[in-house]
Every structure is written in structure tokens, then in C-alpha cells.
Image (cartoon, rainbow, N blue to C red):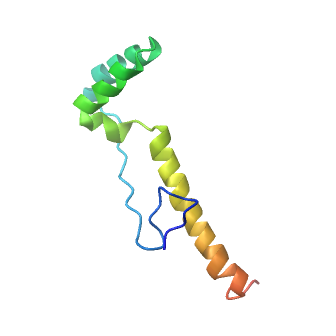
Amino acid sequence: MPYAIYPRSEFADRVDTVPLMSDLEPSDLALIAEYYKLFNSGNLNAAKELIRNNMQLDSKLMNAEKYNRLRDCLLAIQQYYFDNLVNTNLVIWY
């Protein structure tokens, strides 16, 4: 059963699906410049809309939701390890 305290993780019921990220390409530079122009001017809705309309950017920009998902996945694995190995003395420490 997944850990309720890590809602973005499906572990331990199944392996989490974490999308791959990509590096920026030279062909992305005009869109990235437009994104940061909108972002820096405070027009966050238009910046988000630019990403929605150009989905190739989504895998190239990190945001809080992506970070928080990775965090929950990592912490769920650590919690599982702690609950099922460390606390049960199944780990042999050298």
C-alpha cells in the first residue's frame, strides 16, 4: 500500500512512473527566451500557457510539482527500507 504521507508516490503498490527530462536544444532557445520574458514580467499564466502550447518544453523545465514527485518517490523508498529492513534487523551491518 502506498504511504499516505507521500501522496505523489505509488510505491509500494507499484513502481513509480517518473517521466524523463531532456536537455535544451538550440531549436528551443526562442521559446525559452519567450518563456523567461513572460515569467520575468510577472505574466505567469501566459508563461504556463506557452508551455502547454509547446509540450516539448515540459520535459526540459523543472518545476515544484516534478521536484515534489521525485521527493515523495525517494522518501517512500527510504521509508519502506527503514520499516521493512532496518527495524526488523534484516540488515547485517559490518
* The image quarter in which residue 29 lies: top left
Q: Residue 87: image x %, image y %?
A: 72, 81
At x 70%, y 80%, the residue is 86
Whether residue 23 appears in this view of the structure is: no
Q: In which quarter of the image is the C terminus?
A: bottom right
Whether residue 80 appears in this view of the structure is: yes
Q: Is residue 90 above or below residue 3?
A: below
At x 65%, y 77%, the residue is 83
At x 58%, y 60%, the residue is 5
Q: How many labels does the image show?
A: 0
Residue occupying the far front of the picture: 4
At x 33%, y 17%, the residue is 34
Comparing 8 with 82, the one in front is 8
Q: Residue 58: image x %, image y %?
A: 33, 38
Comparing 25 with 51, the one in front is 51
Q: In this view, does 22 lie above or below 49?
A: below
